[in-house]
Image (cartoon, rainbow, N blue to C red):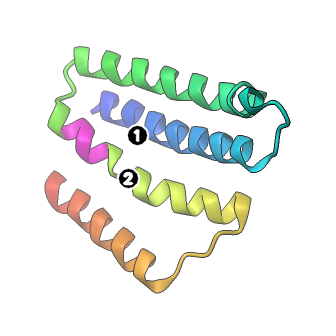
Amino acid sequence: MKYAWIALVMVFLSACAQMLLKQGARKGYKPWWRQYMNGWVIGGYTLLFGAMIANIWCMSKGLQLKELSIIESVSYLFVPCLSWCFFRERINRRKALAITIIILGVIVFFL
């Protein structure tokens, strides 16, 4: 169970990494390659790589892949909430309903 919590934190960090990647994509850079080689993008990919390594470690300690896949679906909650906080993106009723269905599915799976 402890590894499930670690995996959940890694899912949150992956959602944060997506925010870093979006921030890097929002800025315009003159040389085209700077779009992919700036601090936001490098930081986002570094965070994603660290989360991936931690997830592999959790699976090596006994967390099953099917459990990890369900835990990773919580990112569908984290990403819209973080994008609302940082980028003021709207969460409409359709998105809210979809997030609710996903979270209910996660809860049903773990019962």
Mark 1 residue crowding within 10 angstroms, few (<14) / some (14–19) / many (20+) = some
Q: Is residue 40 visible?
A: yes
Identify residue for label 2. Answer: 74
Q: Is residue 76 left or right of residue 78?
A: left
| Residue at 26% from the left image edge and 67% from the top image edge | 104
Secondary structure category for the residue under label 2: loop
Mark 2 residue crowding within 10 angstroms, few (<14) / some (14–19) / many (20+) = some
| Residue at 41% from the left image edge and 17% from the top image edge | 53
Q: Is residue 104 left or right of residue 85?
A: left
Q: Amino acid at mark 1?
A: Leu
| Residue at 38% from the left image edge and 69% from the top image edge | 99
Query: Magenta residues: mostly which secondary structure?
Result: helix
| Front in this rendered view, residue 24 or 74 | 24
Residue 96 on image: x %, y %: 44, 77
Residue 30 on image: x %, y %: 85, 36
Q: Is residue 22 left or right of residue 101?
A: right
Asked if labels 2 and 1 touch by Cβ distance under 8 angstroms, the answer is yes
Q: Is residue 85 left or right of residue 71?
A: right
Q: Which mark is residue 93?
A: none
Image height of 108 relative to 20, above or below? below
Q: Which residues are magenta?
A: 67-71
Q: Which mark is residue 8?
A: 1
Residue 14 on image: x %, y %: 51, 38
- The residue furthest right is 30
Q: Amino acid at mark 2?
A: Val
